[in-house]
């Protein structure tokens, strides 16, 4: 198989997609593992990339060698992961700074960690598009306008997705919010 996508290589052919997956998965995983030092995170990054490729199989055009494209995807996903992690840490630090020092007991730290874990679990339960909008807004810090442009949706639609997501999360986290 050639290293670049050309008319005879298309992702919509399941057999060809599997061949590409089998050929490059390990190399991509090793690269992600090297940068993240976390095998679970590396695996998730590679799976997300292949999922995205499959979802865009009918419209994706790759210029140049496929291997270069895939490795560039890995590096971009890793950068996105670190941006999200930094933003999450920033939000957590801001929250901790707003609490009086006497409120930072071990119990409160445990509750804060439990709330963060529960929020992550609930976010996964959101419908795909609502989850995507919520994560772009809260994890990446994008404005509604930026999200609308990225997803090719109206700002009003983005507002609706966020409203529904926040309503669901508030409802599910009611017990945590009243502790």
Image (tube, helix red, strand yellow):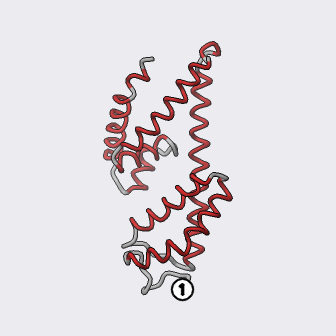
Q: Mark 1: give few (<14), some (14-19) or many (20+) Cα within 10 Å.
A: few
User: Relative to 86, does residue 174 appear above or below in the rendering?
Assistant: above
Q: Secondary structure at mark 1?
A: loop
| Drawn side of residue 45 relative to residue 8, left or right | right
Q: Position of residue 57 (x, y in %)?
A: 39, 71
> Which quadrant of the view contains residue 110?
top right
Q: Position of residue 118 (x, y in %)?
A: 46, 33
Q: Residue at x 47, y 39 (%)?
A: 120
Q: Residue at x 49, y 29 (%)?
A: 115
Q: Position of residue 60 (x, y in %)?
A: 43, 72
Q: Residue at x 34, y 37 (%)?
A: 163
Q: Position of residue 179 (x, y in %)?
A: 45, 17
**Looking at the image, which is closer to me, 107 or 84?**
107
Q: Looking at this view, name the residue that lies furthest to the top.
A: 102
| Drawn side of residue 65 relative to residue 37, left or right | left
Q: Which residue is mark 1?
A: 2
User: Relative to 146, does residue 31 appear above or below in the rendering?
Assistant: below
User: Relative to 160, does residue 41 appear above or below in the rendering?
Assistant: below
Q: Residue at x 54, y 86 (%)?
A: 2
């Amino acid at each position: 198989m050639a290293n670049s996508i050309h008319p005879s290589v298309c992702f919509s052919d399941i057999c060809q997609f599997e061949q590409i997956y089998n050929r490059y998965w390990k190399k991509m995983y090793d690269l992600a593992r090297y940068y993240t030092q976390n095998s679970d995170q590396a695996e998730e990054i590679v799976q997300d990339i292949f999922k995205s490729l499959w979802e865009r199989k009918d419209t994706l055009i790759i210029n140049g060698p496929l291997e270069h494209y895939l490795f560039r995807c890995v590096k971009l996903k890793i950068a996105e992961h670190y941006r999200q992690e930094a933003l999450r840490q920033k939000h957590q630090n801001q929250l901790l700074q707003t609490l009086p020092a006497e409120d930072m007991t071990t119990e409160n730290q445990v509750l804060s960690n439990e709330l963060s874990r529960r929020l992550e679990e609930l976010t996964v339960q959101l419908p795909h598009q609502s989850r995507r909008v919520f994560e772009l807004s809260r994890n990446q810090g994008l404005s509604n306008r930026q999200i609308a442009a990225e997803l090719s949706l109206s700002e009003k639609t983005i507002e609706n997705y966020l409203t529904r997501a926040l309503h669901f999360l508030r409802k599910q986290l009611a017990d945590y919010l009243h502790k």
